[in-house]
């Protein structure tokens, strides 16, 4: 694994599509070493990470900054409202200028193309802290958490609700890299991006995983080891009324869980909206591992910062 880790140095982290199953596994193993305290605590000493935020964040912002500080580095919080981009400076210039000061640029952006523009012009790695299309830090954590609970079992993950979210797109890819079975249950108008489905299927051919997208929530949930959901109203969406009409049958509640495996674990990237995509009894009930999942954001953030970026 050490040679795989070495070849990740300096790479961008925009989407998990840029990583092989072996590279993904190396990141998961390094995350475990961070969680278990097996990595030197000062690996980021003298290193600076710029954290650009175009959108709000709790878990990602705090896990990335605590991870950097914990490893001896400095994380600079840069909401775009306080950068010159708010007055029209380009991301091209921002990337070039920041590259002269810092060792990595992490960004949460409205449009994925902003990350691509940053990556095009920066001379340091760019880390995706969420875009409209992908949320790879989240999906890395999700598989890490699944392995903690299920070991090497080939699990069936069922994602219900808005299949076109950043979270689902990245988890479809992460699941394929890990060789899992993955079913999306979503209204047809909110099925995942076709290109991402096709990329995930290509990976599944190598890893013997599978991916299916269907409409029926109950049918999807059958025998699930993991039921996963995300908000129906992601940051930046506009078709609120249509979503209010179409998503209620996809709510993760006790009835839905009765169709899953008895040992099912419920996951959510959070923030969740109780009473919408998930009920209170399920969110805070015995099947939920959402807070373990949230905690793991710290350990996987450390691995990404250390292995890829610095
Ligand atoms: N899951 C996640 O990314 O949470 P935040 O929006 O709080 O960062
Ligand atoms: N899909 C959600 C994820 C939040 C972490 C959003 O983009 O708002």
Image (tube, rainbow, N blue to C red):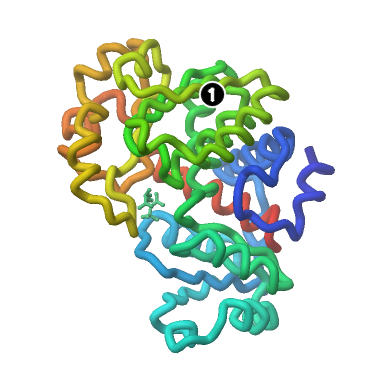
Q: Position of residue 17 (x, y in %)?
A: 65, 43
Residue at the spot 50% in from the left edge and 41% down from the top edge: 193
| Residue 299, placed above or below residue 96 | above
In the picture, the quarter occupied by the C terminus is bottom right
Q: Please give the count of numbered marks on the rendered protein.
A: 1
The residue nearer to you, when weighing 58 against 169, is 169
The residue nearer to you, when weighing 286 against 117, is 117
| Residue 186, placed above or below residue 61 | above
Q: Position of residue 82 (x, y in %)?
A: 41, 84
Q: Position of residue 58 (x, y in %)?
A: 36, 59
Q: Is residue 218 left or right of residue 207?
A: left
Q: Is residue 126 visible?
A: yes
Q: Position of residue 113 (x, y in %)?
A: 56, 63
| Residue 255, placed above or below residue 229 | above
Residue at the spot 50% in from the left edge and 24% down from the top edge: 182
Residue marked by disc 1: 211
Q: Is residue 81 left or right of residue 273?
A: right
Q: Is residue 290 visible?
A: no
Crowdedness of circle 1 by 10 Å Cα count: few (<14), some, many (20+)? many
**Which residue appears farthest toward the right when viewing the image?**
3
Q: Is residue 198 left or right of residue 158?
A: right
Residue at the spot 20% in from the left edge and 17% down from the top edge: 255
Q: Is residue 224 left or right of residue 208?
A: left
Q: Identify the image quadrant of residue 36.
A: top right
Label 1's element?
A: strand
In the picture, the quarter occupied by the N terminus is top right
The residue nearer to you, when weighing 41 against 75, is 75
Q: Is the CB of the residue bearing disc 1 within 8 angstroms of ligand 2?
A: no
């Amino acid at each position: 694994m050490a040679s795989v880790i070495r070849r990740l140095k300096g790479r961008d982290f925009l989407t998990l599509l840029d990583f092989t199953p072996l590279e993904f596994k190396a990141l998961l193993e390094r995350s475990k070493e961070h969680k278990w305290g097996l990595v030197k605590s000062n690996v980021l000493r003298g290193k600076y990470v710029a954290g650009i935020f175009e959108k709000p964040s709790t878990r990602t912002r705090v896990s990335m900054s605590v991870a950097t500080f914990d490893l001896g580095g400095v994380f600079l919080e840069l909401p775009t409202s306080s950068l010159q981009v708010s007055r029209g400076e380009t991301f091209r210039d921002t990337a070039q200028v920041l590259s002269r000061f810092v060792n990595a640029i992490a960004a949460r952006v409205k449009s994925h193309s902003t990350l691509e523009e940053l990556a095009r012009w920066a001379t340091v790695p760019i880390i995706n802290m969420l875009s409209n299309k992908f949320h790879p830090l989240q999906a890395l954590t999700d598989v890490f958490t699944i392995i903690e609970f299920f070991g090497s079992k080939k699990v069936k993950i069922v994602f219900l609700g808005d299949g076109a979210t950043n979270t689902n797109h990245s988890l479809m890819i992460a699941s394929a890299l890990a060789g899992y079975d993955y079913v999306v249950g979503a209204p047809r108008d909110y099925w995942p991006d076709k290109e991402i489905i096709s990329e995930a299927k290509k990976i599944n051919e190598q890893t013997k995983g599978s991916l299916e997208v269907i409409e029926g929530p109950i049918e999807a949930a059958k025998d699930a080891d993991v039921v996963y959901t995300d908000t129906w109203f992601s940051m930046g969406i506009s078709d609120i009324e249509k979503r209010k009409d179409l998503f209620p049958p996809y709510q993760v509640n006790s009835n839905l869980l009765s169709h899953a495996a008895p040992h099912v674990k419920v996951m959510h990237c959070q923030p969740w909206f109780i009473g919408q995509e998930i009920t209170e009894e399920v969110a805070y009930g015995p099947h939920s591992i959402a807070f373990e999942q949230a905690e793991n954001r710290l350990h996987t953030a450390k691995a990404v910062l250390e292995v890829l970026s610095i």
